[in-house]
Image (tube, grey):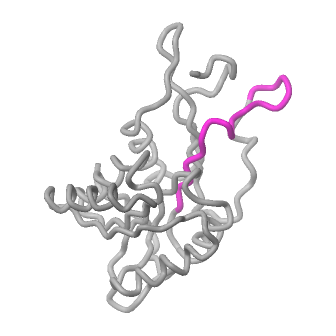
Amino acid sequence: MGTPSHPRPSEGLGATTGSTAAVVVIGATGTLRPASVTLAESGATVVAVARDTDRLDQLTADLAYAGGGVVSLAADATRPDFPEVLGRLLRHRRLRMESVLAYGPATSTEVLDELLRLIDGVLVEILVSRHARPRGDRPWTLDDLPAVAEDGHRRLVLGWHREGDSARWHTTDEISSAALAALATPGDRVLGVVSPWPDRPT
């Protein structure tokens, strides 16, 4: 999969004259590790954000061996000062934040709102299945998601995969592939199915 393109250049967080566009991946060593690898190997500069320094070091080493470009940032992306920490790294490395892939449990609404304010590209927020829990008797739909203030804010809701009479959660490869598709194509989306709610995997 090639690097997603966007119609407008980002002049947001970390932007400097002559800087290089980067994709920030929050949750880069876990659920979004395959997305980080795909982006870097396709030529994108990836800022990989995670809390676990050992796993970040391993990701950096793996991508360097494969010829991909990655800058690691060991940080807690739920903290209110995370955008400031990220901004310092971007300026130091002469990078600008063009787009963001963010695994929801690894960050916070407040942080994402600030990142959206600072970029001119796309932010894809990956929401876990509890966001699709129905309220009352009516099945949940994408229309039940809260309205977003920014055009570049896209949501990917993780459902589950149904296989005959059984169901399973999606793999990290499946989630990462859907996240990259969301980065390249406008609109909110669901991966898999989210109903009937009692049929979700245990």
Magenta stretch bounds: 123-139
Judging depth in this view, the residue of 118 and 184 nearest the camera is 118
Question: Position of 92 compared to 191: left or right?
Answer: left
Task: Give the residue furthest to the top.
Answer: 165
State the residue at coordinates (70%, 59%): 148
Quadrant (top left, top right, bottom left, bottom right) of the C terminus: top right
State the residue at coordinates (40%, 39%): 172
Question: Position of 80 compared to 89: left or right?
Answer: right
Task: Give the residue furthest to the right.
Answer: 136
> Residue 3 occupies which quadrant of the picture?
bottom left
State the residue at coordinates (43%, 45%): 31
Residue 4 inside the magenta-drawn segment? no
Residue 129 lies, with reference to residue 69, above or below; the image says above
The location of residue 12, given as percent across then percent down, is 51, 80
Judging depth in this view, the residue of 171 and 1 nearest the camera is 171
The location of residue 77, given as percent across then percent down, is 54, 65
Judging depth in this view, the residue of 97 and 3 nearest the camera is 97
The location of residue 29, given as percent across then percent down, is 38, 53
Residue 113 lies, with reference to residue 127, above or below; the image says below
The location of residue 61, given as percent across then percent down, is 20, 60
> Residue 41 occupies which quadrant of the picture?
bottom left
Question: Position of 111 compared to 171: left or right?
Answer: right
Question: Position of 61 compared to 112: left or right?
Answer: left
State the residue at coordinates (41%, 79%): 96
Judging depth in this view, the residue of 147 and 172 nearest the camera is 172
Q: How many marks?
A: 0
